[in-house]
Amino acid sequence: MTVLAVTEQRRGELRDPSFELITAGRQLADDLDSELHLAVIGGDVDGYADQLNREGVDAIHTVADGEEFNHDIYTQAVTAMADAHEPDAVLMANTVNGLDFAPAVAGQLDVPLVTDAVDFDASGTPEVTREQYGGKVETTVDIEADQFALTIRPAEWAKAEGTGDADIAAFDFDLDESAVRSTVTGFEEVGSGDVDISEADILVSVGRGIEEEDNLPLVEELADALGATLSSSRPIVDNGWLPKNRQVGQSGKVVTPDVYIAIGISGAVQHVAGMKGSDTIVAINTDPNAPIMDIADYAIVDDLFDVVPELIEEFGGEAS
């Protein structure tokens, strides 16, 4: 009995969800009294396997085909591994890549797929917890099947640590080259490229509560006073007020700063997934029931146009 977790890499580096999958996979494997196996596909698979050899991993299977993520290669490789090892569950990340190939894998294996899990309990009949309506409602899905596929939301499980002693071996299968109908030919950076928000120690992030573009300089002043980097939620980028490289969230960048100050951000699930790993979260919002308040370490229920000038003065700036 096994749980097969499919890791991800991008542009030569393992993505954080890969290490979160180990933690979630170990939890699921313990519930099912199974071993945890990892699938490592594409790129420097030997180097990735060494990095992923963490405590709790029983075996790592590598497939060296492809340099970057490829839907057709991932689908063929994971399906072949599942046929060979007959896992109780196939675990994938609820990311752009994971949601690309997970439905295809579930379809090929003819197993149910539950996406965007924030928790699960498989000690009896597997139960998966999901969120709906921007995190306002939790639902529980029972899985009545011998095998199933599951995608987990990034940043819901801690990254696996510790050194493991997993068996690492190349997984050989007959890749159908004629079925590989696309390939990555290059990458193009979006936005102005002036800053990498994922590297910032302090982020001041602004949302639709700022109301209009002319009010952005107020938040920029606070960022300057704190020596912070300015970021935003998706509506600000969609309106064209800030470039794409400033966007935090599932469709932007995942950030883990020491301090994250969310100003006028309600906390939609897609945004929270991109910043909930921050060490300290400060939220400023007029709505005490906004989802962002549930994860904030410090919550200020007040009008940002009253609070932000006070903070600017407190930290040595001049509020305009």
Image (cartoon, rainbow, N blue to C red):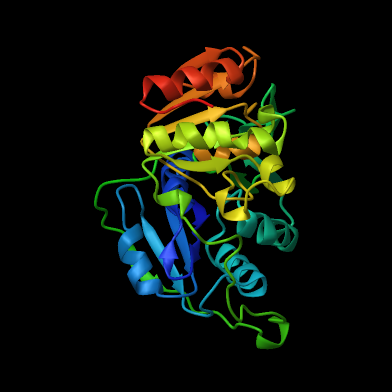
Between residue 240 and residue 272, name the one nearer to us.
240
The residue lying at 36 percent from left, 25 percent from top is 315
Q: Where residue 185 sits in the image (x, y, percent)? A: 61, 81
- Tell me if I can see residue 117 in this picture: no
Between residue 163 and residue 191, name the one nearer to us.
191
The answer to whether 162 is drawn above or below residue 316 in the figure is: below
The answer to whether 49 is drawn above or below residue 88 in the figure is: below
Q: Residue furthest bottom?
A: 178
Q: Is residue 260 left or right of residue 236?
A: left
Q: Quadrant of the C terminus?
A: top right
- Tell me which corner region of the image, top left, top right, bottom left or bottom right, holds residue 153: top right
Between residue 282 and residue 225, name the one nearer to us.
225
The residue lying at 66 percent from left, 14 percent from top is 287
Q: Where residue 50 sits in the image (x, y, percent)? A: 30, 65
The residue lying at 62 percent from left, 54 percent from top is 244
Q: Is residue 223 left or right of residue 294?
A: left
Q: Where residue 182 sits in the image (x, y, percent)? A: 69, 79
